Amino acid sequence: MQDNLSHIQPLPNPTCGNKPKGLHFTHKKRLFYLAVVALLCMLLFMTINLKGNIEYILIHRGWMLLTMILVAFCAATSTLLFQTVSNNRILTPAIMGVEALFILIQTLVIFFIQAQGISFLGVMGKFLCESALLILFSLFLYRGLFTKLKQNLHLVLLIGIIFGILFRSIANLLQRLMTPSDFAILQGRIFATFTRAEPILIVLSLIIALITGIVIWQMRFRFDVLALGRDNAINLGINYQQNVTLILLLVSVLVSISTALVGPFTFLGLLIANLAYSVSGSNQHRFLLPVACLLGIIFLVGGQLILEHLLKMSGALSVVVEFIGGLLFIFLLLKR
């Protein structure tokens, strides 16, 4: 069956009632308000408490802001698309073992090669090697297993969870055998931070994310059809295997570059995606995707502002995000 979507119109939201145009206007108003709040957070982040060498501070904050925008986009988009193809709102790409593999790679490097052992690769080489390994693992998991297992997505998810447990177990074993100094270096690498990324890596990641984002936006109406389930999507003319495989590969690219750039954020996407469903008031991805990205920016930039200027950096943003996201995950499980 040909994957021809020219005759398929965007699916109406069941809650739209008899005035879809008015409701679409309401969605656009919510997008506008979120954009204003996000811009305000970014403006405050760049301008509040400017003292000393203003040029240096603005450059430093600018790169941090770009990193947070990139991570917000990657986490929000990848989680939304992953939940769409899996038809489950409590799943995130993190369960597939990509972030566990990142931690294992860092552990293996420190344990066997030492921190200076791969310095010949340079910053760019290290980033590209880590990203390539994460993407290759995703290719094996998504393309290989998804095809061989006759499009059984849930079985692929189960295998991904098993791989994640395996990677974490090996990493934990090696970490227990490390010296305290090596373990301290490792802890600095596996905890997410927005100040570690080099400018050249941020620019490269932004280019990759921009290209991926363009492809995703062009497919936005297909996501609404895929959200109806496998059988309904096939009946509506969707090439299910091809589209799901492509979406999972796009998700793996976003997760890989984000993880290799700043480190793992396990529950950030879960937190943003579930807020997006409530705030957007729509199930259409043309509203869900921008709302989720804006919420991610507000959450990260606003959270960094609170930590830096109200709490005087008495905690790490990644720890706070993981704590809140973990509570939300438990709540969703109990809510069923």
Image (cartoon, rainbow, N blue to C red):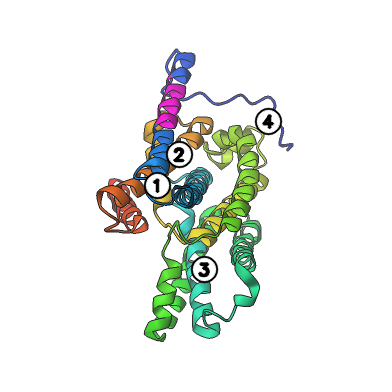
- Residue 131, given in percent of the width and then of the height, sits at 60, 62
Above/below status of 101 relative to 287: below
Tags 2 and 4 in contact by the CB under 8 Å rule? no
What residue did someone put label 3 on?
A: 101
Tell me the residue that label 4 is attached to. Answer: 5
Task: Find disc 2 in the rendering and name its residue.
Answer: 292
Disc 2, disc 1: CB below 8 Å?
Answer: no
Secondary structure found at label 2? helix
Q: Relative to the observer, which residue lies in front, 204 or 144?
A: 204
Disc 1 versus disc 4: distance between alpha carbons?
36 Å
Q: Secondary structure at mark 1?
A: helix
x, y percent for residue 77: 52, 44
SS at circle 4: loop
Q: Which image quarter: residue 156?
A: bottom right
Q: Which residues are magenta?
A: 26-36
Mark 2, residues whose alpha carbon is within 10 Å: few (<14), some, or many (≥20)? many
Q: Who comes first in sequence, dot 3 or dot 2?
A: 3
